[in-house]
Amino acid sequence: MPLRHLTPRDRRLFRQYGHGPAVPVPDPLIHHAVERHARAVPDAIAVEHEGATLSYAQLNRRADAVAARLARAGVGAGDHVGLFVRRSTAMAVGLLGILKAGAAYVPQDIGITPRGQLDHVVRTAGAAVVLTLREHASNVPPGPLVLTLDGPFDDRPGDPRGETFGDPAGGPLGERAGRPAPDPRRPVAPDDGCYVLFTSGTTGRPNGVKVTHRNVANLLLTAPGDLGIRPGDRVAQLLNIAFDMAAWEILGCLAHGATLVVRGRDIAAAARTATVLIATPTVLSGIDPAACPRVRAVAVAGEPCPRPLADRWALRADFYNCCGPTETTIVNTMSRHDPAAPLLTIGRPTPNNTVYVLDADRRPLPVGEVGEMWAGGACVSAGYLSDRALNAERYAPDPFLGGGHRMFRTRDLGRWTADGELEHLGRTDDQVKVRGFRVELDSVSSVLERVPGCARAVTLRRDARTLVSFVCPADVDPAAARRAVAEALPYYCVPENVMPLPFLPETDRGKIDKQALLRLATERPAVGAR
């Protein structure tokens, strides 16, 4: 019995706190929900981008045309199709068309992704077909059949085969050499792939994670992951399509009949007209809540959220602080934050999911003790592509659910509060040794974010003896910041250097760019050092 070492009370709380509610999922195939809205409200606006719009009927017909094109090229259930695009209405058409064809989409922002990474994505995913935009077709690595999405469509109801979009040369499309036509007896199944996301990986080589329809539908079609989205809502599409939270924006919107507001260069402009925002804390920190009077729901994930940011938005909207890596399908815990609450937590497991706080031997810890979070249930993805060793390291049989279920090692540290909320305490790889002492970097940053005027803070280890912290905005007093840490934490946690910045650099996925900060620390003279 995996719980025999716990007291009867902790055994009961292990199940009570660690298991999300068991609820039915309306449909395990996420694109079916989009199709239902196309039938129910065909004239409602599904997507808008810089003045261009698509109704649900137009989106559905164009996606049908893409699916038919992919089928003629031999694409069927179980295949992976590259979606190498920039933000546009065509992005949504291609995504939905791939799902209708039974395949999983493999998204990359073709405008900013290096050619070498695109080649790695194509090879690892085994993508024999790539959908892209005409101006970027020449950037697709050689090998796959390249189809462009931005040619003219015939939007008349009826037979979708009248479309004239095509290959980069404008010629007719044929069958893929050596590939049979798709078997109509093999419909897409809930455990088939919905998308393949490439994470940054620990070796610098992106890892392809296959996420199923069942995984995605479980989050997006149940509360609170559905964020209460309904027809009439406007969901801002702010994030890089290669980031899994973009799937929450796009499919979470379209599966509930709302309008997807695809941003241009101005993130704030899209947010100002939205009713729902999904973002990283870094992206959200650049948006003024006072300028977004229509926003009623906000969800953040991807990195720790500063308490002041959460409080500021929670005073105006339902604010959800969430957590979960790509491998557990966007997020697997959510908490609706109350500014009056003593802690900002990541809440509890979402429906049909579980979270376990385990020790190094994978044994459950009592409530209140810090351990590593493992995720189980419907959120656990199909695994990494072509990497048995990494799958064996990060996925394991779930001894608590049994029955063939698996659990995933998140590498997040956490503990249960007395009332059953999860505190996120950083990453296992954010625990560093400084002067021989173990330091949790996020705990230093949390203290800094309580300094008056500090909106964001990041702490990094510069070398074996020193920490460096970065705070914004630029008028934060670095000496006061260091004093705050010295008063709250042991001396070895006090950063040698505090660098005020007008803003913190971002990665292309809307997270803080820690490598850029470390480079900055070596280029600038110390500020606020002893």
Image (cartoon, helix red, strand yellow):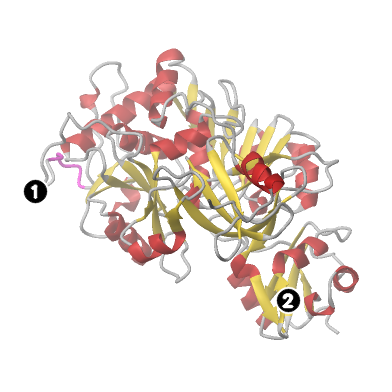
Q: Residues within 10 Å of mark 2 (few under 14, many from 20)?
A: many
Residue denoted by label 1: 178
Mark linked to residue 468: 2
Above or below, comparing residue 164 to residue 382 in the picture: above
Q: Is residue 235 visible?
A: yes
Q: How many marks?
A: 2
Quadrant assignment, res 236:
top right
Q: Amino acid at mark 2?
A: Val
Q: Is residue 269 visible?
A: no
Please provide percent x and percent y for residue 51: 51, 32
Q: Nearer the viewer, residue 328 or 100?
A: 328
Q: Relative to residue 224, is residue 389 drawn left or right?
A: left
Residue plotted at (48% across, 29% down): 254
Mostly what secondary structure, the magenta segment? loop
Secondary structure at numbered mark 2: strand
Secondary structure at numbered mark 1: loop
Quadrant assignment, res 166:
top left
Magenta highlight range:
169-174
Q: Relative to residue 144, is residue 27 drawn left or right?
A: right
Above or below, comparing residue 476 to residue 528 in the picture: above
The single residue placed furthest to the top in the displayed view is 40
Q: Relative to residue 318, is residue 342 drawn left or right?
A: right
Please provide percent x and percent y for residue 309: 76, 49
Quadrant assignment, res 485:
bottom right
Q: Residues within 10 Å of mark 1 (few under 14, many from 20)?
A: few
Residue plotted at (30% across, 37% down): 151
Above or below, comparing residue 85 to residue 490 in the picture: above
Q: Nearer the viewer, residue 264 or 411?
A: 411
Q: Nearer the viewer, residue 448 or 378?
A: 378
Q: Relative to residue 104, is residue 74 drawn left or right?
A: left
Q: Amino acid at mark 1?
A: Gly
Q: Distance from label 1 to label 2 (Cα)?
A: 57 Å
